[in-house]
Amino acid sequence: VGLKCHFKKMALSVDEVRRIAALARLRVEPEDAERSAAQLSRIVDYIDQLGHVPAASAPTESGRQPYEREDEARPCLARALFLANAPQALDGLLVVPKVRADGD
Amino acid sequence: VTEPRELSAEEIAEGVRAGRLGALEVTEACLERIAGVEPRVGAFLRVEATAARDRAAEIDRRRARGARLGALAGVPLAIKDNLCLAGAPVTCGSKILSGFVSPYSATAVERLLAADAVIVGATNLDEFAMGSSCENSAFQATRNPWHLGMVPGGSSGGSAAAVAAGGVALALGSDTGGSIRQPAALCGVVGLKPTYGRVSRSGLVAFASSLDQIGPLGRTVRDVALGLEVIAGHDPRDATSERRPVPSYRERLEEGLAGLRVGTLREVEEERLALDSRRRWREAIATLGRLGAEVVEVSIPSLPAAVAVYYVLANCEASANLARFDGVRYGRRVRRPGADLADVYLDSRSSGLGAEVKRRILLGTFALSAGYHEAYYGRARGVVESMRRQFAAAFERVDLLATPTTPAGAFALGEKVDDPLTMYLSDVFTVPANLVGVPAVAVPSGLDDRGLPLSLQLLARPFDEATLLRAARAFEREAGFRTAPGFREAAAA
């Protein structure tokens, strides 16, 4: 199946990397964009070769019986313990910045 | 006279239980050793000396009152800093978890404590366990105790270096694609990735949930077997943990290799191995034969695709798992004046996560994005299924599979940081065990031409850690390798 790791094409453009970063809620700094696109492209070129590797049809579960339990309320983390790690809390609630109306 | 810190975990526990050794005495010896080597090695992110002393003294008091102590009585132990310990920080080697304090303990950590182990500190790792060198830690580089200019491997490099340097007898790591076995190999210690489901993942900060597994690193196979006996077993807090009982892995450990069939992979011969690694690998195979194993060649044709498959599946899961680090519920929040929620996500994540973690999140997000999901994630799942069948067929013919753990010994700090793909490719022998869920152990096999450790990897059928460890023990005894790093200075390269 030998996979090669030297490529001529660029799998991802800088614009594509920006689009993916937006989906992942990450910022691509302008000075890193080219380098980032080149590094990611090299990896994507490499994994693109999976298209030529024989594959079986994957079952939805990998042969393991899923563990099932009753759907019932159970004790969980105490509110105070949870909020102890919150960046900001007020009156037993988590404080978050406003959500903009335009959906982003 | 053997120094307390040179004793095996098994010897310490027996000594403390029998009252021949004090837990505090052992802990002091280990803390002293850690203080002596840490400035050079940097294995620990935190050494909790006071907590360790208090705990050891309490164990001694309980022993004095006639209490029956646990299987790890007084054993100084380190845990990778992606395992939760209630009331202590857990950083995952990342700035994004700054200020976080674990509200509960990982099940594996609870079991260590229930067995009367003494946790002395938390070890360094590649950020979120993503890396093979520990250089992706946001806090420090860990150095290889054998040669301070070399990496200890990763991502559990701190745990491997701590054990090799003699600061602790045992450590816990986590292994998603080789993160226990590769650093164990590079530091000349034993590292075990148990079968997926054998050890609860509850309280392990998730990287790739279908591949992650907690396991022990130690100086001897016996200690690793002991560690597994303690941490293995069903846990209702992890739905993927297995219900079948945990055997005593030490009971038949000394029974040798006679009568076992060991398969070597034809594909290993086609991989790029360093010359000294190949020589050591051939010697290791000869050793297995000399010990009475029947060595046969088998084939896993999809092996060369393993790295590509792994970096699709692991990154897809990572991009989903790491979405929770958003500056909202815990950890670092960056909030500029006038910022809304989306800005907080972007600013907190962009400033809190390191370059390699971002790279993997981007790759995973790409592979899962509209139009690409089937071509990458779907395809990778299919190749894994095919690999799973190839392993199942191989394990009908043989009891164990053998490969080198890594294609070469330790590399220099900084050597591969700018070349992620090359770094990834050296995982070729370790990722298959995670992809197909079988147990695998790395055992030191000797030294390379530079005097740095090399390692043999053995793999077994799911939940057959008993046979796996028994074979590893036989090999260890015959190979005669002793973990004795020289702390060679970087300049002496």
Image: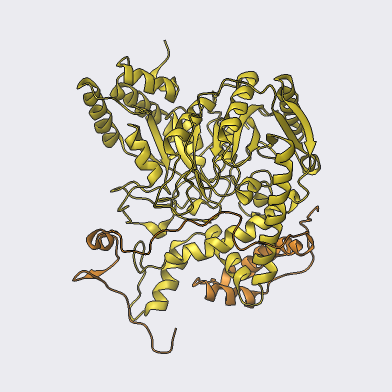
Image side of residue B334 versus residue B60, left or right: right
Q: Drawn colour of chain A?
A: orange
Image side of residue B417 versus residue B52, left or right: right
Taking the spot 58% from the left edge, 61% from the top edge, the residue there is B315
Compared to residue B176, the image places residue B185 above or below, namely above
Q: How is the image coloured?
A: by chain
Compared to residue B63, the image places residue B138 above or below, namely below
Image coordinates for residue B272, horizontal then vertical, percent: 77, 43
User: Is residue B408 visible from the viewing direction of this image?
Assistant: yes
Figure quadrant of residue B394 = top right
Figure quadrant of residue B120 = top left
Q: Drawn colour of chain B?
A: yellow
Which corner quadrant holds the N terminus of chain B?
Answer: top left
In depth, the one of B232 and A30 nearer the eye is: B232
Counting labels gives 0
Compared to residue B317, the image places residue B432 above or below, namely above
Figure quadrant of residue B482 = top right
Taking the spot 32% from the left edge, 25% from the top edge, the residue there is B28
Which corner quadrant holds the C terminus of chain B?
Answer: top right
Taking the spot 38% from the left edge, 19% from the top edge, the residue there is B14
Q: Residue furthest front?
A: A70
Compared to residue B111, the image places residue B237 above or below, namely below
Image coordinates for residue B349, horizontal then vertical, percent: 45, 67
Image coordinates for residue B227, horizontal then vertical, percent: 45, 33
Q: Residue furthest bottom?
A: A102
Image side of residue B4 versus residue B251, left or right: left
Image coordinates for residue B157, horizontal then vertical, percent: 52, 41
User: Is residue B46 visible from the viewing direction of this image?
Assistant: no
